[in-house]
Image (spheres, helix red, strand yellow):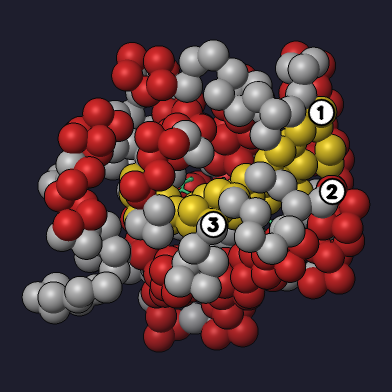
Amino acid sequence: MASFAEIHKSPYTALANAVLGNPLAGRVILITGAGRGVGEHITHQMAIAGAERIGLIGRNEPRILATRDKFAKVYTGTTFEAFTADITDEKAIHAVFESFGAPDILINNAGTFSDDGPFVEQNLKAWWTGFETNILGTAIVTQQFLRTKPKGKTAVVLNVTSMGAHMRFPLVGFSGYNGSKMEQVRIFESIRFEHPEVRFINIHPGNIQSDGFVKSKSPVPRDGMTDGVVTGQFLVWLVSEEADFLSGRFVWAEWDIDELKAKKTEILEQNLLLTTIDGFKNDF
Ligand SMILES: NC(=O)c1ccc[n+]([C@@H]2O[C@H](COP(=O)([O-])OP(=O)(O)OC[C@H]3O[C@@H](n4cnc5c(N)ncnc54)[C@H](OP(=O)(O)O)[C@@H]3O)[C@@H](O)[C@H]2O)c1
């Protein structure tokens, strides 16, 4: 499959080295959907990278508490706080920020796959619930974060979207998911102009074995599934100063970081990794 950069499905030395030495020491992180799947992998690598405090959000209380306790036992230098909340519930998310405060790094990971077959056969109310979680829920968390964050304070917002936002693969049963994931990207591409002090990055996390992946009935890629360690380490790297040039852009967690760095000038001068329609030259 064509790609922007070499793909890594399993951990590799350059990325592992880039996240050595507690790069997140003193940093405060809040992550949605942290109890399982992709979010659990990201939380794990953020803890290994020495984060000072990590807030975990999920709807399933026993699960989010179990994930908190599992990590707290091993990573004793990090404080873990669990919150049971639905990201589409504005009041509940407001309460999370009142209790936790504004993190340095917000990770919008919670998402859902609500398609059930071809578009023409869908119950659109059920189909729409995916938009409510993926778009409205992500917007609620991000808005509450921006309202809580002291004005002008720098921050990083990592938005876990999907290759489905931009890939043209001929799969049946992805209309709602792909549409909602694309909209997430456009929201962050838009609000980055309103908040230049925040590094917003949209990310495809790779194809990771999870409940969500099974539910989507996505085919297993020919080159295999992605190890969640790569995804988590890549997100840790995205917080580093080295990755600042990716602000506002869309990246895949599997892309080789040395190749990305080598393409920095090309990315910036040619406005790459931003959405557009093919053939349209966009100067912004
Ligand atoms: N796995 C992949 O291959 C893949 C590929 C591309 C993109 N992604 C994206 O990666 C993210 C995580 O996917 P996943 O595969 O880990 O999915 P998953 O196994 O279904 O897990 C979804 C996570 O989101 C949380 N969540 C869902 N709805 C929520 C809500 N309304 N409020 C709060 N938390 C909610 C769930 O926690 P509770 O159930 O406890 O609330 C769970 O932790 C999603 O945004 C997905 O689109 C995944």
Circle 3 SS class = strand
Label placed on residue 79? 1
The image shows residue 107 at horizontal and vertical percentages of 60, 49
How crowded pointer 1 is (Cα within 10 Å; few <14, some 14-19, many 20+) is rated as some
Of labels 2 and 1, earlier in sequence is 1
The image shows residue 116 at horizontal and vertical percentages of 50, 69
Amino acid type, mark 1: Thr
178 lies above or below 49: below
How crowded pointer 3 is (Cα within 10 Å; few <14, some 14-19, many 20+) is rated as many
Which residue appears at 81% of the width and 28% of the height? Answer: 79
On the picture, is 4 further left or further right than 78? left
The residue closer to the viewer here, 123 or 232, is 232
Disc 1 under 8 Å from ligand 1? The reply is: no
Spatial distance from mark 2 to mark 1, Cα to Cα? Answer: 12 Å
Does the CB distance between marks 3 and 1 fall below 8 Å?
Answer: no
The image shows residue 281 at horizontal and vertical percentages of 13, 75
Spatial distance from mark 3 to mark 1, Cα to Cα? Answer: 24 Å
Label placed on residue 198? 3
Circle 1 SS class = strand
Q: Nearer the viewer, mark 2 or mark 3?
A: 3
Amino acid type, mark 3: Val
Q: Give the residue pinned by disc 2.
A: 100
Spatial distance from mark 2 to mark 3, Cα to Cα? Answer: 19 Å
Of labels 2 and 3, earlier in sequence is 2
